[in-house]
């Protein structure tokens, strides 16, 4: 299955699947457990109510016998409920006994199943008890309970407010004479039946069931989210390490490639430098000589001299990049250093309308004065070339951050090409070598400084953050 194939981009995919499947399995088990606990709670609830109903039935039996049966037999000689006086006396005893017990209705049947007494008088004389119930109570002298519900178990789970008489407990109890007359076995006088409204108790059980369900789901959901959070965090850390490893591998390959290239460039540049120096010095000597004599050959010699000089700078760039030297550790005043750069580039600035601004208080940095001069020379020369004939260059010293910011009004940097600008031999200039920014980065890395290219509202921006200041 594709699900179990390792994905380098998502190394914890299987762990996620296992955590989710475990969550589903545990949740299903928890729901089964909830159903079991809920059913057990419902059984306890039913047993509690039946025990209470049995106590009430026994109390009714006792009150009827002591307060009605005995006095009636002594006073009238026999029990005749059709007699209004006897019926009212029995009604008074029953109502005083069931008062405040949520009893909805009470009936007393004779042994044939006819209603002899009822709190609802319209039921008198009706045969409402089945033969099976009569046999159970009279012959076997057993009581039983019947739960009458107007809502199903499934619907009850989603009913949070039960209307009155939604759940009724019916109790059927053999009405017995107590052992007052020395009889070995109490005779059955009739059958007692009463109904209780237990809707509120049933509603409490439903609330309890939902409480258990919600607690189980929430607890397992929290555990699952914690597990997923740990897995996500572990994946992020692993991916970060993988990215760091890839960066280190890329940097290592790049270093090896540049090292071999540097050795080759160094050898070639060394071979070119000697004859190039002869060409440069000879062309300069002849150019100055023919210029004094106003000879037409002077302009050709001038072109040879300028091109030889430019080629010499290119060879120096190659050598500087191929053979970087270890920086000296000395105090360098950055503002003074940058002023020297602007002074040296005065010829570049003469033919242009470029304003120079310094902002902030300069600070002293620890490093190699010559190498840092080369850094700012390359950066400021790039700014001058980027601006064209008119604009401004601003050097901002942020001494509290140990940072130097160089801004200009040039076209800036393309966001998608930021990393490309720092690659050796990449250039957007027609006559550039593509080593200027690469040399700058190398020197700053040797100084432990951070270097970044970005844009501001009017042009390009370079930020250099020094650690040792």
Image (tube, rainbow, N blue to C red):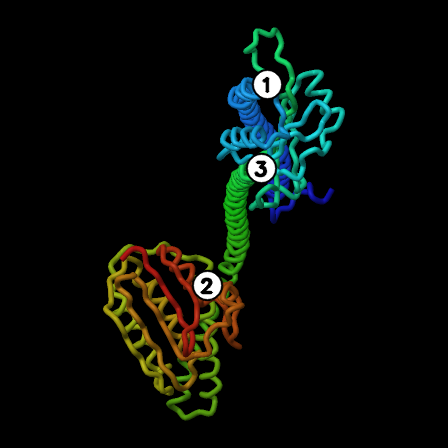
The answer to whether mark 2 and mark 3 are in CB contact below 8 A is: no
> Does the image show residue 34?
no
Seen in the picture, residue 305 relative to 317 is either above or below; the reply is below
**Residue indicated by mark 1:** 77
Q: Is residue 67 above or below residue 303?
A: above
* Separation of marks 2 and 3 at Cα, in angstroms: 96 Å
Residue under the point 39% across and 75% down: 381
Q: Nearer the viewer, residue 147 or 218?
A: 147
Q: Position of residue 94 (x, y in %)?
A: 54, 30
* Left or right of residue 99: residue 173: right
What secondary structure is found at the residue carrying circle 2? Answer: helix
Q: Position of residue 23 (x, y in %)?
A: 60, 38
First of labels 2, 3 by sequence position: 3
Indicate which disc residue 104 carries: 3
Give the residue pinned by disc 2.
Answer: 438
Q: Is residue 158 left or right of residue 310?
A: right
x, y percent for residue 132: 75, 24
Residue 99 visible to an observer of this rendering: yes
Residue closer to the observer: 196 or 131: 131
Report the residue at 45% width, 68% height from top.
Answer: 436
Q: CA distance from mark 2 to mark 1?
A: 126 Å
């Amino acid at each position: 299955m594709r699900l179990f194939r390792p994905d380098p981009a998502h190394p914890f995919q299987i762990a996620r699947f296992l955590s989710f499947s475990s969550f589903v399995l545990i949740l299903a088990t928890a729901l089964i457990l909830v159903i079991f606990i809920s059913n057990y709670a419902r059984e306890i609830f039913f047993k509690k109510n039946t025990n209470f109903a049995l106590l009430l039935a026994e109390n009714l039996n006792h009150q009827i016998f002591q307060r009605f049966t005995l006095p009636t037999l002594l006073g009238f000689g026999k029990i005749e409920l059709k007699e209004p006086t006897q019926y009212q006396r029995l009604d008074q005893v029953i109502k005083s006994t069931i008062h405040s017990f949520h009893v909805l209705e009470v009936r007393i049947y004779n042994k044939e199943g006819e209603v002899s007494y009822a709190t609802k008088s319209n039921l008198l004389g009706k045969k409402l008890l089945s033969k099976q119930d009569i046999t159970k109570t009279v012959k076997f002298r057993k009581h039983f309970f019947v739960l009458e519900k107007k809502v199903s178990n499934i619907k009850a789970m989603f009913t949070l407010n039960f209307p009155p008489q939604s759940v009724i407990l019916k109790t059927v109890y053999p009405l017995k004479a107590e052992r007052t007359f020395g009889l070995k076995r109490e005779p059955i006088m009739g059958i007692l039946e009463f109904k209780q409204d237990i809707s509120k108790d049933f509603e409490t059980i439903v609330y309890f069931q939902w409480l258990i369900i919600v607690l189980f789901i929430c607890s397992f959901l929290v555990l699952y989210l914690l597990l997923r959070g740990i897995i996500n965090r572990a994946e992020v850390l692993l991916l970060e390490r993988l990215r760091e490893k890839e960066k280190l591998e890329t940097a290592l390959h790049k270093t090896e490639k540049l090292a071999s290239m540097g050795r080759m460039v160094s050898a070639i540049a060394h071979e070119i430098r000697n004859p190039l120096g002869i060409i440069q010095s000879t062309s300069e000597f002849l150019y100055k000589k023919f210029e004094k004599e106003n000879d037409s050959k002077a302009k050709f010699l001038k072109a040879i001299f300028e091109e030889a000089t430019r080629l010499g700078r290119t060879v120096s760039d190659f050598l500087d990049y191929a053979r970087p030297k270890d920086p000296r550790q000395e105090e360098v005043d950055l503002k003074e250093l940058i002023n020297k750069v602007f002074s040296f580039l005065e010829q570049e600035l003469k033919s242009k309308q470029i304003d120079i601004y310094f902002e902030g208080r300069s600070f002293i940095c620890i490093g190699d004065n010559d190498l840092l001069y080369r850094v700012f020379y390359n950066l400021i020369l790039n700014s001058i070339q980027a601006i064209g004939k008119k604009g401004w260059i601003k050097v901002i010293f942020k001494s509290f951050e140990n940072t130097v910011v160089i801004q200009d009004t040039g076209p800036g940097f393309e966001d998608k090409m930021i990393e490309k600008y720092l690659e050796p031999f990449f250039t957007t200039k027609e006559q550039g070598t593509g080593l200027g920014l690469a040399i700058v980065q190398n020197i700053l890395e040797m100084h432990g400084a951070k270097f970044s290219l970005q844009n501001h509202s009017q042009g390009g921006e370079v930020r250099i953050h020094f650690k040792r200041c």
